[in-house]
Amino acid sequence: MASLIARVTSTSTRAPLARLLTSPLGLDVWEVGADHLVLQADEAQVGRLQAMGYDVEQLRMTEQYLSAFATDEAAAGYHTVATLEEDLRRLAEEHPGIAELHEIGRSVENRPLWALRIGERRGSTRKVAFLGCHHAREWISVEVPYLLAEHLLQNSSSDPVQGWLQQGEVWVAPMVNPDGYEYTRTQNRLWRKNRRRNRDGSIGVDPNRNYGYMWGTLDVNTSSHVPADETYVGPRAFSEPEVRAVRDLVARQLFGGVLTYHSYSQLLLYPWGYTSEPVEDEADLGEMRELAEEMQRLIKDVHGTTYTPQPSSQLYPTAGDTTDWTYGEYDAPSLTVELRPASALDGGFVLPPDQIQPCWEENRPAALHFIDHVLGGPAR
Amino acid sequence: MPRSEQTLVARVTPAAGHSVATLLGLSLGLDVWERQADALVVAAPESRLAELERRRLASVERWGTPTQYQARQRSRSADGPDDS
């Protein structure tokens, strides 16, 4: 039976709105106003409400509502795979002296994986990487690193950006998982993994469980060996072409720091993910913890938003994630930033497009601090 | 699709004697969206949520299907942005 979204009002004393909140009608109430309710109901439930004396105004059929919002979202600010490529190409073309677009690999479905190299000279030994969108449904994690690249190029003639780009390189790969991202735009907004067809017929490996440091050492909800699960670690470390592309980029460039964006929960995570034991090297632990704490302060100064710094495993255990590998294998200070919002009740993965700009604004000084720390500090 | 295989978004609160870490340590294929101090927000088939309840590991507050959840979030965002 078709589902619709309706606004319910009443002028009848025999049909008080409050009764609807407690009556066992099976209504899905979305919004409660002083003089109205907005709810999702099927046609039979609507008929019943009208028979009880309520005025029911159909706002939209649920499926139409979802598809309309998908269109609105597309128009309102989030990239598609195609527009991201266009914009990255444009940035490179407009700044030929300091920006180069590199195809670092191809996805399972043969989409190119792009990374923008930003810096005045090649072969610098000081390099920092920003990654986005390992998880398809985390759309904001594409926009923040993209806006960082745009910011660096637009400000490349003035300090401090100019100084950083003279002495080092910033690599930005905003979309590690384009197949999954495309799938979230066309089929399932809440898809997480890539689009690998697994041997049991299920689809998808979690790219952020497929890196080779302590890969596969956990078998829990948040790092699973069951192919159909959302956190499926894959059949072996680096089994996925998207993850191999990042592996090869990191191996070539030997970054002095890696920051990877995810959403949501507003957290600043540092290794380890695979164990609740702290990083043994106290200097390394102190460096990453202090970075995270300073970034927390910088973020809060912009819009007052709280991001909490903590070891990754304190969120939940994850074996085979990006930052365990970049720190564990390369000793690079490595952070995962979980972007807006704070909770599922604030939108979860479905962050409204009008939140992109404030989310970027608050993360900008934190990202620049990370760059300054890696490129501006003493050589490692 | 059988009702038991329908994926639901839910808030899962550990039962007395158990902890959020206990729930995270299970191998039930929960898609963990969010860790709160005293609960998890997950997406999982109804059968697995029911298994948590049957084993008395957790109480489950079912929020609806992912489609219903998304529609609700979009409805909120359409009402106007929160202060940033």
Image: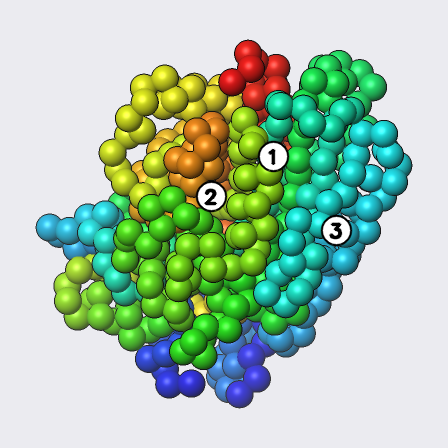
Q: Disc 3 on helix, strand or loop? A: helix
Q: Which mark is residue A84?
A: 3
Please identify the quarter of the rendering in which residue A356 is found. top right
Residue A375, above or below A204: above
Quick check: marks 2 and 1 in contact, CB under 8 Å? no
Disc number lying in front (3 or 1):
1
Quick check: marks 3 and 1 in contact, CB under 8 Å? no
In front here: A96 or B37? A96
Q: Is residue A361 left or right of residue A188?
A: right
The x, y position of residue A263, in whole percent, is: 51, 46
Q: Which mark is residue A253?
A: 1
Mark-to-mark CA distance, 2 and 1: 16 Å
In front here: A45 or A74? A74
The x, y position of residue A371, in whole percent, is: 61, 23
Residue A233 visible from this viewpoint: yes
Disc number lying in front (3 or 2):
2
Q: Is residue A45 left or right of residue A358?
A: left
Disc number lying in front (2 or 1):
1
The residue to which callout 2 is attached is A322
Q: Disc 2 on helix, strand or loop? A: helix
Q: Amino acid at mark 2?
A: Thr
- Ranked by sequence position, the earlier of labels 3 and 2 is 3
- Few, some or many residues within 10 Å of mark 3 (<14, 14–19, 20+): some
- Ranked by sequence position, the earlier of labels 2 and 1 is 1
